[in-house]
Each structure stands twice: as structure tokens, then as C-alpha cells.
Image: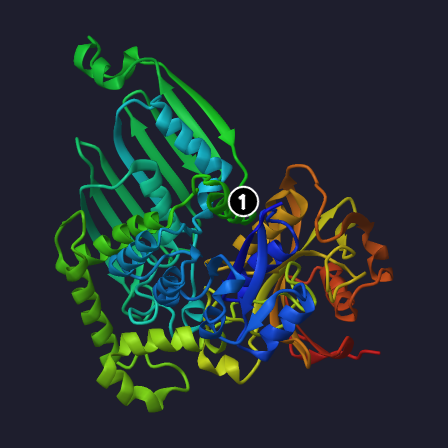
């Protein structure tokens, strides 16, 4: 069977996940030929996890020096480096699959599209939410015409609540110079892609943006956008990372029906006749002559990264249409950039966007930010003169390309588990969650979740017997994992439980914070939950065997010594606790609960 050979640049959180998918055979028509691993930790991960036939290079430049080994390049680095890496790959005649967004501005996206067109190679972008069953169903309804003439579209999303700790987790984060913006350029890109995929592009955008409403920074954390479409249709978007209440709602009002999406639920309210025609010809003064029929559908979300990668391979090998062409990344960026420009200028902006004008205005924000010292990279203050003399934005972007591994490490494969709340490998190249330069000098703390589902006096336990190179091998643990880009602990909790068990949580409690300190794994902060309500049917888990175990027998299983302590605290019904566990290798050396040292032995 013919397989597409690919090289992967960026072995952080998502890069490692993609690499293991491909190397483990989850993407049938794709073969991992090479990876870029700048640090010793990343190279050790590659050596322990990947097939020995996979070439490991210390930099993107070195990898690009061996183009004969691969046909395509997967770019999973900080998005400020996407353009340069993609342009180089296209110049070598390689197909490119790029993580979102394709850049920080429409100018960058334009240059990438030009490079792709000139090379004649495939260009795809990771807008995997197009594959969600819910979103495909929405698109099917819209394209069927059953809503009639679209009159109004409204999107409200406060899903991505973010704290000061999140924004401070990397010197690049939430800055104009490092990230190119705030919520619109980060969490909003998937939403904006779905918007243009569903409804197309508006003719005019007017935005009111709160810059630093909830935080002491100059980028956006709350956005209100009004759009005009050809005809009389209007659209509005509200995004916020500062509202604690979680809301995810889309409403599409047509002349024959209304579509309301809330979470994973789709409700279609159909009218007995077209409302516009009724309004023109009815003898009634209101809606007395109309009848309404509602139908609700539930579409649980499943992330389909494998299908996106397989589609890319088949597009190259067999000419299959791409699910998300790289050129479409331009549109999501254009919506974000036009909103920024509108807010800066204080007036509506017509599309297509003036790329040069946006670059000029963005440069002003970067210079203002630089003047306040916001964008200096930690540990790099002695380079301030170079930043000022040669252009801060370009220097930083070059640094992130050259030193992405030292700057980034959102999460690696957990040493005690990448999927169930344990960490060992502490470095990676170019994930979408960069941190400061100090990560090159010390292990980084990770944030994970772990959940114990309970029913009829039993806990749902996972016996880890399946995963290759698993340091949890033969251990019994709960269900959970590391936070992905843009997730809160609760987002991660619900996603991991659904992915590992097939169950969708409806009732859960945050029970405690567990701090793991290890001479091998570094430091990890684990949010511990219990759950007693869910929907769905229990499915098989790819990580091992799921089994309901009587609570009084759990500590008889092969579990970690520290886990026995928090199981006891759970059974004591402590309202909330902070537990610190210090390990040397696999031996528990210290346990501290709410500041009180416990005797162990």
C-alpha cells in the first residue's frame, strides 16, 4: 500500500499526538519519516516512542537539508513561525499541512497561499472542527435550504474562560508582537472558520472590542462583532475569555425555520409557512395563523485528527478533495483582522480587507507594546537593543522558529501518562502553547485532570495494559489527561472522559488539587474530580481495560502510593484539599495535605 511520507516540525503537545498517531498506524496512508527535536528530552521521547526508522533532526534547517526523505511537512509550531516554515517547505517542493491559524495576519496567509500555488503542492490547515458531527449536521441543514431565506445569525461563546495565570504562562501569550492578538487570533480561529464555512464572508464588519477588559494587557479579551451580508441578512458574534459562565450558542433565523445550537444540541423550529409571505398576505395581526414544530437532536463531539491527516494523505496520493484547504485559513484570519481594524479605526470595514493597511496598524500596536516593555522575552533583556534596531516583531519570530523548543512545551506525553494525568517528558518543539525561555533551564509544571467516576459504591478504574512505552504499565488509575490549547480544567475533564469511556458527564465535583514533584517527571498540578452523573454507554478504551471496582478494594490494586492518600481523602468527604506528593523514581518520599506533613511508610 502506498503511503505518504511526512516530516513533522513541532514535537510539543499536538505534535507528539500527531506523531504517535501516524507512527502507530492510526493514519493508514501516512508514514512518519522524520521529526524535528531540538532538546535532549524531545530526542529521548522520539527514541523511546517512535519507530527506529524515523529520522530525528535537531532543527528545522537540518530537517530541510534532507528533503529526499519525505514528501510532505506537518507544521505544528507556534503560529508566528508558520509562514516561514511553510514557504521553505513549498520551495523544496513539499506538500504542507499546517496547524491553525495559518499566520497572524492576512498578509502572512496571502504569502503562504502564493507559495503553495507556485509550488503546485497540496496545502491543508487543521480545522478539524469541520468534521464534528454537529457541525456537519448544521451545514447540511443550511445547504438544504429548509430554513428559507437567512435573516439573522448570532453566535455567543464564553467557553474559553481564561485566568491571569493562563495569560502569564508564556511571554509571547496575549501580546500583539508575540501572538498577533488575543481571543480572536487564538481561541476564536476555529469559531471564525466555522462561521465562514457555514455562512460565507460578509461584505462589512463593525467591531467593538474590549482590549484588556479583564486583564492588564493590550490585546482583546472580549469582542462584539456586527456583520452585513449581501441582501439584508445580518450577523453578530460575541466572544469572551473573561466570563465565568459557560455559554456556547448559535442561532440562525430564516424565513421558514430557525436553527438553535446550544452545546451539542441542535434544535430546529419549523414554521407552517414562509414567515415573509405570511407577513405580507396574512389577515392576522400577529403570528396567530402560524404553527410551529420543534425537533431536537444531540450530536456528541469527537475529535477527528486522524481523519484530517488521512484526508491530507489521500489528497496527495489519490487527489481526494481536502476537508480544509490551506487557502481557507485566510478567511478566518480576514474576519479576525477586519474586526481588529474596525475597532482601531472606530468605523465599519469593508471586505476584502486592505492587507497593507492592516499590517501598518498592527505594527503600531506592536511598537506601542514594545515601548511599554510588554513583549521582552524572559531571560532575553540583553537583546533589547537588537529588537529596537532591527524590528522587534521579526526578531522575535525568528527566535521562535530557531528556538521554539526552548520556548514551548504545552504538554508532552505523560511519563506516568499523557492521557490520564501524569507527566515525565518535559520538553518539545513548537507546540501551540509556548512558554518562556526559562523552560530551557528547568522542568515545566503541567496542568492535568483526573476523574474517578463513582456508582453503587464503586469507582471506574482503568487498567493500563495497552499503550506502548507506558510508565503506567499495569497500573490502575482514573480517567483524565493534559489540557489542550484553549481548555479549562472542566473542558479537559469532560473531553477526556468522553474520549476514554464514551460517557458524557452531567454531574461532577472538583475535589482537590494534587501537586506531583518528581526527580524524573518535574512538577505537575493535577485537578482531581469525582463524577456521579453521565449519559451514554461505556465503550472500550484504547489505553487499557475499564472496570468497575468496589471502593474498599481499590487500594488492593496495583496503584501509585500517593493515589491511596487521595482516595482516603475522597472517602473522608473533605470539601476540598491540596495534596503535595514528592516522588523519587516510583518511591513516594513525602506527602503534605493542606500544609500538614503526613507520615508515610
Q: Quadrant of the N terminus?
A: top right
For label 1, the SS is helix
Number of callouts: 1
Please indicate whether residue 380 sits to the left or right of residue 497 in the image. left
Left-right relation of 407 to 558: left
Res 48 visible: yes
Indicate the position of residue 115 as horizontal and vertical percent values: 31, 58
Q: Quadrant of the C terminus?
A: bottom right
Which residue is rendered at x = 56% and y = 83% of the image?
Answer: 442
Depth check: give the residue in front, 533 or 45. 45
Q: 27 or 217, which is in the foreground?
A: 27
Residue pointed to by mark 1: 307
Residue located at (66% from left, 71% from top): 47
Residue at left 44%, top 29%? 267
Q: In the picture, residue 570 is in which quadrant?
A: bottom right
Q: Is residue 377 above or below residue 294?
A: below
Residue 369 found in image quarter: bottom left
Q: Seen in the image, is 117 located left or right of residue 400? A: left
On the image, the x and y values in percent for residue 92 come to 40, 63
Residue lying at the far front of the rendered structure: 68
Toward the viewer: 425 or 550? 425
Q: Is residue 377 above or below residue 504?
A: below
The reply to whether residue 523 is in sight is no
| Near-viewer residue (507 or 495) | 495
Q: Is residue 477 above or below residue 157?
A: below
Amino acid at each position: 500500500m502506498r503511503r505518504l511520507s511526512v516530516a513533522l516540525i513541532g514535537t510539543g503537545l499536538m505534535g507528539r499526538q500527531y506523531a504517535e498517531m501516524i507512527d502507530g498506524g492510526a493514519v493508514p496512508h501516512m508514514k512518519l519519516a522524520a521529526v524535528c527535536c531540538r532538546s535532549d528530552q524531545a530526542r529521548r521521547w522520539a527514541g523511546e516512542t517512535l519507530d527506529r526508522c524515523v529520522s530525528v533532526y535537531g532543527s528545522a534547517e537540518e530537517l530541510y537539508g534532507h528533503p529526499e526523505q519525505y514528501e510532505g511537512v506537518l507544521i505544528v509550531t507556534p503560529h508566528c513561525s508558520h509562514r516561514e516554515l511553510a514557504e521553505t517547505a513549498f520551495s523544496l517542493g513539499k506538500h504542507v499541512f499546517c496547524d491553525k491559524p495559518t499566520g497572524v495576519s492576512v498578509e502572512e496567509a496571502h504569502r503562504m497561499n502564493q507559495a503553495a500555488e507556485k509550488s503546485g503542492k497540496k496545502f491543508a490547515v487543521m480545522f478539524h472542527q469541520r468534521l464534528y458531527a454537529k457541525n456537519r449536521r448544521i451545514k447540511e441543514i443550511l445547504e438544504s435550504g429548509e430554513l428559507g431565506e437567512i435573516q439573522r445569525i448570532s453566535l455567543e461563546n464564553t467557553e474559553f474562560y481564561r485566568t491571569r495565570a493562563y495569560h502569564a504562562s508564556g511571554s509571547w501569550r496575549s501580546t500583539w508582537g508575540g501572538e498577533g492578538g488575543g481571543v480572536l487570533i487564538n481561541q476564536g480561529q476555529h469559531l471564525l472558520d466555522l462561521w465562514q464555512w457555514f455562512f460565507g464572508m460578509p461584505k462589512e464588519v463593525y467591531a467593538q472590542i474590549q482590549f484588556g477588559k479583564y486583564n492588564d494587557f493590550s490585546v482583546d479579551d472580549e469582542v462584539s462583532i456586527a456583520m452585513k451580508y449581501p441582501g439584508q441578512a445580518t450577523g453578530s458574534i460575541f466572544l469572551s475569555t473573561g466570563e465565568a459562565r459557560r455559554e456556547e450558542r448559535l442561532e440562525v433565523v430564516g424565513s421558514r425555520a430557525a436553527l438553535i445550537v446550544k452545546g451539542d444540541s441542535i434544535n430546529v423550529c419549523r414554521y407552517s409557512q414562509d414567515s415573509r409571505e405570511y407577513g405580507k398576505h396574512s389577515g392576522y395581526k400577529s403570528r396567530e395563523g402560524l404553527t410551529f414544530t420543534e425537533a431536537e437532536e444531540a450530536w456528541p463531539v469527537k475529535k477527528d485528527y486522524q481523519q484530517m491527516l488521512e484526508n491530507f494523505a489521500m489528497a496527495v496520493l489519490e487527489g481526494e478533495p481536502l476537508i480544509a484547504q490551506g487557502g481557507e485559513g485566510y478567511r478566518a484570519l480576514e474576519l479576525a483582522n477586519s474586526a481588529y481594524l474596525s475597532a482601531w479605526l472606530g468605523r465599519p470595514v469593508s471586505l476584502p480587507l486592505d492587507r497593507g493597511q492592516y499590517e501598518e496598524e498592527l505594527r503600531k500596536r506592536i511598537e506601542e507594546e514594545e515601548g511599554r516593555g510588554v513583549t521582552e522575552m524572559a531571560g532575553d533583556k540583553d537583546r533589547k537593543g537588537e529588537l529596537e534596531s532591527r524590528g522587534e516583531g521579526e526578531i522575535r519570530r525568528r527566535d521562535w522558529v530557531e528556538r521554539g523548543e526552548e520556548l514551548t512545551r504545552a504538554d508532552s506525553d505523560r511519563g506516568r501518562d499523557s492521557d490520564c494525568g501524569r507527566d515525565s517528558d518535559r520538553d518539545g518543539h513548537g507546540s501551540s502553547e509556548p512558554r518562556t525561555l526559562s523552560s530551557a533551564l528547568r522542568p515545566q509544571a503541567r496542568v492535568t485532570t483526573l476523574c474517578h467516576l463513582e456508582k453503587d459504591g464503586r469507582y471506574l478504574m482503568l487498567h493500563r495494559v495497552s499503550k506502548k512505552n507506558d510508565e503506567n504499565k499495569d497500573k490502575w488509575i482514573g480517567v483524565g489527561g493534559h489540557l489542550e490549547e484553549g481548555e479549562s480544567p472542566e473542558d479537559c475533564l469532560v473531553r477526556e472522559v468522553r474520549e476514554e469511556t464514551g460517557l458524557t458527564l452531567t454531574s461532577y465535583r472538583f475535589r482537590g488539587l494534587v501537586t506531583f514533584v518528581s526527580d524524573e517527571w518535574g512538577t505537575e498540578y493535577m485537578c482531581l474530580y469525582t463524577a456521579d452523573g453521565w449519559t451514554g454507554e461505556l465503550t472500550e478504551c484504547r489505553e487499557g481495560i475499564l472496570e468497575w471496582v468496589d471502593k474498599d478494594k481499590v487500594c488492593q490494586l496495583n496503584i501509585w502510593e500517593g493515589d491511596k492518600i487521595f482516595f482516603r481523602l475522597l472517602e473522608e468527604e473533605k470539601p476540598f484539599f491540596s495534596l503535595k506528593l514528592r516522588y523519587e523514581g516510583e518511591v513516594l518520599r513525602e506527602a503534605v495535605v493542606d500544609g500538614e506533613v503526613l507520615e508515610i511508610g
